[in-house]
Image (spheres, rainbow, N blue to C red):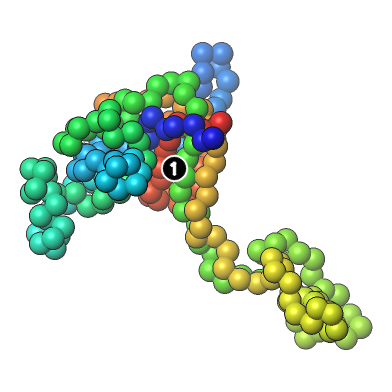
Amino acid sequence: MQKAINKAIYGRKIGMTQVFDEAGLMIPVTVVETAPLTILRKKTVERDGYSALVCAFEDINERRLTKPEAGVFKKVKQPAKKLVKELKLSADKYEVGAIIDCGIFQQGDFVDVSGTSKGHGFVGPIKRWNQHRLKETHGTGPTVRKGGSNGMRSDPSRVMKNMRMAGQWGNEKVTVQNLKVVKVDKGRNVILIMGGIPGPKGGLVTVTETVK
């Protein structure tokens, strides 16, 4: 059974740098800028079938929203925000209008970070799956970077599922687990996380307490 998640926040990947610990060892870290989340609504198991918090973050001019979007914020008497997302946290611990910031995490915590990986478009099997190039002699051409045989002529006379072929590479949800929080700067709304996390600079990521 999956452990219940008590701490989670959204943020933007700023990039990577390095810090030094008390022993003088260099630690590679990823800087995540977390915007304070405003709770707009609480979803409950009784009414919605699952427990979650509807949160908004990143300020925006209200004139850039549609009337239905702006009405959501007027209903709870909160300023307009750019993004509205859900966090599957316990709705009992928070009230509508409350703020969640990076202070929920502390140095030494272990977290899981989810984000959308960099998209590389349509690529061939060599770049996508690290396959070998075909021979450049004895009539193999005219192309040597295409895929080889994909199936059999007789039985089953089709391409099997999960065959490694050319196609879309990247631009998918990726989660990296058990990363250590090196530092939390509440004044700057920044979390330093050891190691790399998925996504490009400026990409939206979700930081949650680890489930393992």
The quarter of the rendered structure image containing the C terminus is top right
Q: Amino acid at mark 1?
A: Gly
Q: Is residue 29 left or right of residue 96?
A: right
Query: From the viewer's perspective, is residue 121 above or below residue 68?
Result: below
Residue 144 seen: no
Decide which of 63, 30 is in the foreground and name it. Answer: 63
Query: From the viewer's perspective, is residue 72 above or below residue 125?
Result: above
What residue is at 73 percent from the left and 61 percent from the top?
130
What residue is at 61 percent from the left and 71 percent from the top?
167
Q: How many numbered marks, from 0 up? A: 1
Provide the secondary structure element on which disc 1 rests: strand
Q: Quadrant of residue 122?
A: bottom right
Location of residue 47 in the rendering, given as x and y in whole percent from the top left corner: 27, 46
Q: Of all residues shown, which one is farthest toward the top?
A: 22
Location of residue 77 in the rendering, given as x and y in whole percent from the top left corner: 8, 43
What residue is at 13 percent from the left and 60 percent from the top?
68
What residue is at 51 percent from the left and 58 percent from the top?
172
Question: Which residue in the structure is indicated by mark 1?
Answer: 15
Location of residue 175 in the rendering, given as x and y in whole percent from the top left corner: 52, 45
Q: Is residue 132 left or right of residue 173?
A: right
Disc 1 crowd rating (10 Å Cα; few below 14, some 14-19, many 20+) is some
Location of residue 85 in the rendering, given as x and y in whole percent from the top left corner: 30, 49
Decide which of 33, 79 is in the foreground and name it. Answer: 79
Q: Of all residues shown, which one is farthest toward the front?
A: 46
Query: From the viewer's perspective, is residue 16 above or below residue 117?
Result: above
Q: Is residue 207 left or right of residue 161?
A: left
Q: Quadrant of residue 15?
A: top left
